[in-house]
Image (tube, coloured by chain):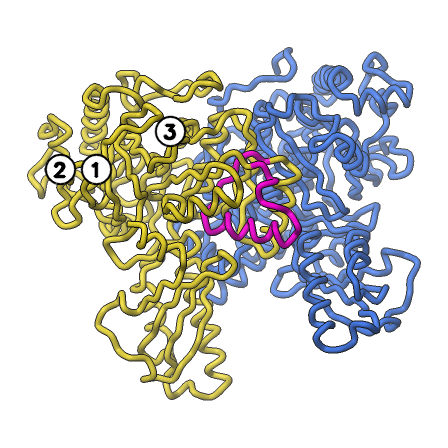
Chain colours: A blue, B yellow
Amino acid sequence: MSATWPPRYDPAWRPAPDAEHWAPGLECAEPKKRDEVVLAKLRAQVQYAWERSPFYRRRWEAAGVSPARLRTLADLAKFPVVQKADLRAAQAAAPPFGDYLCIEPREVARIHGTSGTTGHPTVFGVGRDDWERIGEAHARVLWGAGLRPDDRVLIASFFSLYLGSWGALKGCERLGATVFPFGAGLPGQTLMAVQWAREMSATAFYGTPSYALHFAETARREGIEPRDFGFRTLFFSGEPGAGVAATKRLIEATFGGACIDMGSMAEMTPWMTNGECRRRTGMHLWQDIVYTQVCDPETFAPVPYGGEGTPVYTHLERTSQPMIRLVSGDLARWTDEPCPCGRTYPRLPGGLYGRIDDMFIVRGENIYPSAIEDTLRAIEGFGGEFRVIISRREAMDELLVRAEYAATHAADAPRAALAARMRERLRARLGVTPRIELVAAGELPRTEFKAKRVIDDRDLYKKGVANV
Amino acid sequence: MSATWPPRYDPAWRPAPDAEHWAPGLECAEPKKRDEVVLAKLRAQVQYAWERSPFYRRRWEAAGVSPARLRTLADLAKFPVVQKADLRAAQAAAPPFGDYLCIEPREVARIHGTSGTTGHPTVFGVGRDDWERIGEAHARVLWGAGLRPDDRVLIASFFSLYLGSWGALKGCERLGATVFPFGAGLPGQTLMAVQWAREMSATAFYGTPSYALHFAETARREGIEPRDFGFRTLFFSGEPGAGVAATKRLIEATFGGACIDMGSMAEMTPWMTNGECRRRTGMHLWQDIVYTQVCDPETFAPVPYGGEGTPVYTHLERTSQPMIRLVSGDLARWTDEPCPCGRTYPRLPGGLYGRIDDMFIVRGENIYPSAIEDTLRAIEGFGGEFRVIISRREAMDELLVRAEYAATHAADAPRAALAARMRERLRARLGVTPRIELVAAGELPRTEFKAKRVIDDRDLYKKGVANV
């Protein structure tokens, strides 16, 4: 650990292939010892944000805190949390990056974003140096998952806004593996991916858990037994499945390789700083890269180890859009019980197994019922009420929107046009194509609770909840 | 130009933003002077391939040539050409990379490939150092196109096998621009791309010409005038359109920015070494990166400037899978008439305007009628004859396959199943989803000429031919 901030890493350095840890001095340190490093980085990060970001200065001044108040890690809890809605508001006021961008816009190397399921997309502007540090952090976490330079990694997830694919690519590059960024999403592409995986003798797979199962079914239809791919490692983010015991068992039984759960939030890139090691005892919180506290969902005070709460994330080496106390909204339990790998990080033994709000995830996209409501209400002919049914077909999520049509649109032609319009508008807003089912106005019972509008019929999530 | 081979470039160096050339000493050199540099690189490249590649040694020994024979650039014509089929055969014999891979398989950083339209995909294994040089070469060519570090580039093409997107990304990164690798291909994605382009104030666009026109139509449907995006530069590869005068005029009139034609072959990555400069006088051949000769399509001897032939490409700084005298199969006319930009490279004033074989391009995919034939013939129920009709709907290519069904499949249900099977198989093979139209066996006139089976009904290509 260098004493300068932001840290600089030697892009050519790598551990010996038989080393279990990338940075054992940090990963296996006595936690109190490591906390000194974390605190030093945290203080530099907070000071940096204070100097460069009107967003943070405004909020911290309002809360009566400043960098000088940060003398211990416990002091961090005095700083106000950031909610995703705060980021969207800041970007609406100072487009496109918001006044938490701490570099010049022209220093932004990469733009990514959310697909704007809650009304307006969130824009990620990642600086050039941050992008290199993302590679470093990912490589370290992937090393812990058991990836090595002689691995041949098939990335089978869509390359667009979604950051998971890009982070996996950057991390594998830095780690020195051979990467095949095949992507996903186009009709017929899974069949091609199956053929390529065999052709290339891929040894590792990245995607979402549901896509991996779809991939296996596609292979079986082609007469290929998924174990014959020879994947030594399958690593996942974008969905909680890989941390759910039943799903993990299913994936490992299907492919014969280790199923590794990863992921935090796109805003936190490198978000894979929640990442399981090869022992699969739940995701480690790689605290010296991103400092994470599991907090009470009301007060946002950290809960003791053993308790349940929502992860709250803080960057420690981010210069472009640093997040300091960003509320994930996920639910998790954390523990400091030792892991046989020797890493002394806290862990999330059950992964991220729920939400504190009504958001749900379909094919890797975060979807809020409020966004569906908002979209439907702007369409002429909508009858006023709707339901959302999420199910799973051949291991792919399916989103059904059952919506009422107004009496003015009861005839066949306007009804068909209405359905097409709803499908197109929702698709553009959600990033996922829904099936639309129209019913006459008044047919659906009215409800006061948004959550009641959503029926999640997927095994994965049922098992996830049963597992808690 | 360093004297060592392969050359190493300083990844941090960039010209001043107001410089017109990245490397004026090479780009604007007296051609004879630059040829000395080209010859030195060529000799090193050929010697390297001779030492490392059984593929080249075998073929050169059979032709009675060796590196020692290469004393002038003219001597290169004595070396046998490489056809794409030779690469496929070499990969079938030594999978997956073929015995023209000159590095260890574990040194391959990136795997890409063709979608295998002619039966078996071709696999590209790009080494780590090559990948960096690709960035350097692209950046230089993009600089010539007028891109600068303050540009914000929207990449609106699919990120998967197709190398165009990845090269544009790498080049823009190296150039220091802000890149938004948005991708393309998913239903509804064009509408999102339109919204993001406005949101991000993108100043440059990369994709295929037909996709740019589709993008413009989508914008207009949303009430957005394409000129209001403010694209200063639109650069293209993957299709010949941007080099066709009528299409170039249409794109420039639609968007108000400069339409820049680029592209050579995926095998040649960096394939953008055919690239127009800001003056748009036809693609320059950036001879000190990739050495290109326009050759007679029968004898493969270079034709004089002013003549027509097929470009034959030779890498000058490729260590992973060097291509030495690779036949493109495209048709072009070349000239050495000066360009007002000051670059002294030869140029292709009409771009790549045709093919010497029956290949056609749909949505950026190379498609051979033989692959369609091959796929259909393996399906039970196929009636023996077919036609291919390529048309354009809303500026997107559409591929219609009209195929006969056998008498055994005349009933509704087996016929529908047959159509679905044809669609799925062709999609997996071609990378493009065709429309299938079934007719009874015997309805289509038999033909002996494969080319007669293909009807290309796209304006773009008609104009292209009319323009020659």
Disc 3: host chain: B
Query: In what element is the residue under mark 3?
Result: helix
Badge 1 is on which residue? B293
In the rendered image, residue A394, in percent from the top left (x then y), is placed at 61, 64
Name the residue rendered at 85%, 21% in the picture: A60
Q: In the image, is A350 to the left or to the right of A342?
A: right
In the rendered image, residue B251, in percent from the top left (x then y), is placed at 47, 45
Q: CA distance from mark 1 to mark 3?
A: 19 Å
Any magenta on residue B229? yes
Q: Amino acid at mark 2?
A: Ala
Disc 1: host chain: B
Disc 2: host chain: B
Q: CA distance from mark 1 to mark 2?
A: 9 Å
In the rendered image, residue B125, in percent from the top left (x then y), is placed at 36, 40
Q: CA distance from mark 3 to mark 2?
A: 25 Å
| Residue B77: mark | 2
Residue A398, picture quadrant:
bottom right
Q: Which residue occupies the foreground of this view, B166 or A139? A: B166
Does mark 3 fall on the same chain as mark 1? yes
Answer few, some or many: residues within 10 Å of disc 2's Cα (few below 14, many 20 plus, some between 14 and 19).
Answer: some
Write down the region rendered in magenta. Answer: B202-230
Question: Up-down: is B353 above or below B457?
Answer: above
Q: Amino acid at mark 1?
A: Gln
